[in-house]
Amino acid sequence: MADPLLSSLKIAASGLQAQSTRMRIVSENIANAQTTGTTPGSDPYQRKMVSFQSELDRVSGAQMVSVDKVGRDDTPFILESDPGNPAANADGYVKMPNVRMLVEMADMREANRSYEANIQVVKQAREIINMTIDLLRS
């Protein structure tokens, strides 16, 4: 049987890594929220999304989280009238990315909270391990 404290550390570490990837993708989406295509009618930046999966760590028997894939959001692009833009089509409309800042900010907040929760798990496990070592010394 695996040590439950070490298992909790492994689970939290997998959560930290998954949420770190999620925050990186959300940051990329925010950074490219105004990135249009370079030629008339070309597609702009397409929003990315992270999906997770659960996987079994055979050594500890714990269910870990990992990034399953980073996919593209297929929601339609937003059309804006900007006839002077080099990426404008014949009607003067530019395809803008399908990035919605409100959604990105909500995703960033959720990823940040999950990241912080996993950090707290690591801190608590370390504290319990240190307390156990102190008790054994006594």
Image (cartoon, helix red, strand yellow):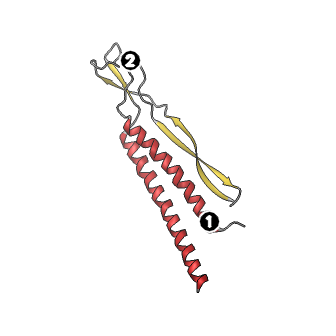
Residue 42 as seen in the image, left or right of residue 138: left
Q: Label 2 crowding class (10 Å Cα cut-off): few <14, some 14-19, many 20+?
A: some
Nearest the viewer among 84 and 138 is 138
Nearest the viewer among 108 and 134 is 134
Q: Which residue is drawn at the image coordinates 40% and 35% (left, top)? A: 99
Do the CB atoms of the residues marked 1 and 2 lie less than 8 Å apart? Answer: no
Residue 130 as seen in the image, left or right of residue 77: right
Per the model, the C-alpha gap separating discs 1 and 2 is 54 Å
Residue 40 sits in quarter: top left
Label annotation for residue 80: none
Toward the top, the furthest residue is 90
Quadrant where the N terminus sits is bottom right
Toward the left, the furthest residue is 84
Residue 66, horizontal then vertical, whole percent = 59, 49
Badge 1 or badge 2: first in the primary sequence: 1
Residue 27, horizontal then vertical, whole percent = 41, 42
* Residue kind at label 1, given as amino acid type: Leu
Residue 22 as seen in the image, left or right of residue 64: left
* Residue kind at label 2, given as amino acid type: Thr
Residue 4 sits in quarter: bottom right
Nearest the viewer among 123 and 74 is 123
Label annotation for residue 6: 1
